[in-house]
Amino acid sequence: MDTELREGIHWVGYVDWNVRDFHGYRTKSGSTYNSYIVQDEKTAIIDTVKAPYASVLLDHIRSHTPFDKVDYLVVNHAEPDHSGSISAVMAACPNATLICDAKCWKILGMHYDTTDWPHQIVKSGETLSLGKRTLQFLETPMVHWPESMFTYIPEEKLLFSMDAFGQHYASASRFDDTEPLDVVLHEAKTYFANIVMLYARPIRNTLAAASGLDIEIIAPSHGVIWRKNVGAILKAYQDWTHHKPRKKVLIVYDTMWKSTEMMANAIAEGVLESEVDLRLYNVNASHITELATEVLEASGVAVGSPTLNMTLMPQMACLLTYWKGLRPAEKVGFAFGSYGWSKNGGPTEVEAYLKEMKFDLVQPALHVQFVPTKDDLEACRGAGRLLAQKALENHTRLHQQEEI
């Protein structure tokens, strides 16, 4: 396996083929925990791996250098999937000094016994010489924890980007040009949607702060390393962080006796009269991971639930709670659904969720009692036409806005 980023710089991490869950995010493609070694007059390790795989990391490091030749361990992020092996590395490498920012050092102390660890606190703009190469540090608060940091090697035009630009994607090769680009970009989009969508503004600010860096390689903490398609992933992040949608309408619904499903299909018929992409999902047939990915690039969204026990259906409540945490922004939409004897139930509570997420509601919630009539279904088609129109207007507005 090719692990060389540049001469003397290698990947030494772990490929986790079998992980299938990450905080509720379904990682159907597995993942990697990326760690890197930089060998110069001094040697630095950049991040570690999840604790169960510490022995593999140490084997990889030892294949490049004796442990007593490791001078620095740079910690860009304290989350345990990257910091879990720090104790093992510090114990194995007697001459290593841990490098991190002040917030990271504090958080590491809440996870591990750091009492005997030699350490050095760094700030944005500070550098550390390894000899011919320099490590330059850029603090990136809330991308996606408050202590996160990028490390950059200007001589190699190489950015160690922590969780930014990553993917939960296991593969036999380490680089973007040795894997199908469409697959890797989709995994990057899924990762962004499910992990860092709510941090879009801090990430946007970080991209602006890093815009002066000359970057040829991006080495994230998960997934493949970007060395050929750096422009493609940077462009994607610009669109995602600025909430630039596609010409797409997303309809998600739950149903009990098919009434809300009939409404969803009629809304879809109205949407399809316009030139927009349509995605129609029963929430029980798709995982929340997929639906978070779909809402990321949707311009218009319709969400439907019947009333169950005076409230909305439980799986729809799960999805909307998940979305609320991720904060999809710049969406137009409306709620819909059927009810039996109480109108204040499913559609009303769905609408409350959409308002809390600051969706621009194009019309009041559509309520149908029991089974929709022909007139009800025509009203749904009309709502679909309106949603498609407003989604196109929203798309145009967001793509015309000057990027801040």
Image: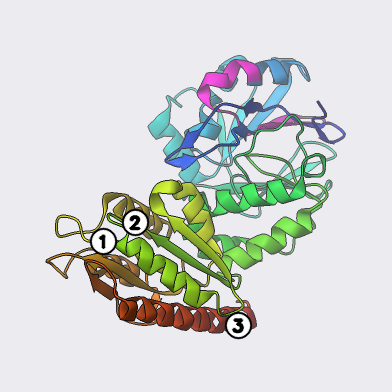
Residue count near mark 2 (Cα–Cα under 10 Å), binned few <14, some 14–19, many ≥20: many
Please state the horizontal and vertical placement of residue 248, each as a whole percent of the image. 56, 70
Residue 269's label in the rendered image is none
Q: Looking at the image, which residue is at 43% across and 73% down?
A: 267
Is 145 located above or below residue 341 in the figure? above
Q: Using the numbered discs, state the Cα–Cα distance from disc 1 to disc 2 in whole angstroms.
A: 7 Å
Q: Residue furthest front?
A: 374
Q: Residues within 10 Å of mark 1 (few under 14, many from 20)?
A: many
- Gap in Å between the C-alphas at discs 3 and 1? 33 Å
Q: Which residue is identified by label 3? A: 396
Between discs 3 and 1, the one toward the N terminus: 1
Task: Estimate the x, y position of residue 232 in percent, counting from the top left.
Answer: 75, 58
Q: Is residue 210 visible in this depiction of the protein?
A: no
Residue at the disc numbered 2: 254
Is residue 53 in the magenta section? yes
- In this figure, which residue is indicated by the disc labeled 1? 306
User: Looking at the picture, how far across and down is residue 277, in whole percent?
Assistant: 59, 69
User: How many neighbours does mark 3 have within 10 angstroms: few (below 14), some (14-19), or many (20 or more)?
Assistant: some
Q: Could you say which is closer to the camera, residue 336 or residue 218? A: 336
First in sequence: mark 1 or mark 2?
2
User: What range is drawn magenta here?
Assistant: 34-56
| CB within 8 Å, label 3 to label 2 | no
Point out the image quarter for the C terminus. bottom right
Residue at (29, 75) in percent of width and height:
373
Whether the residues at callouts 1 and 2 have beta carbons within 8 Å, the answer is yes
Amino acid under disc 3: Thr
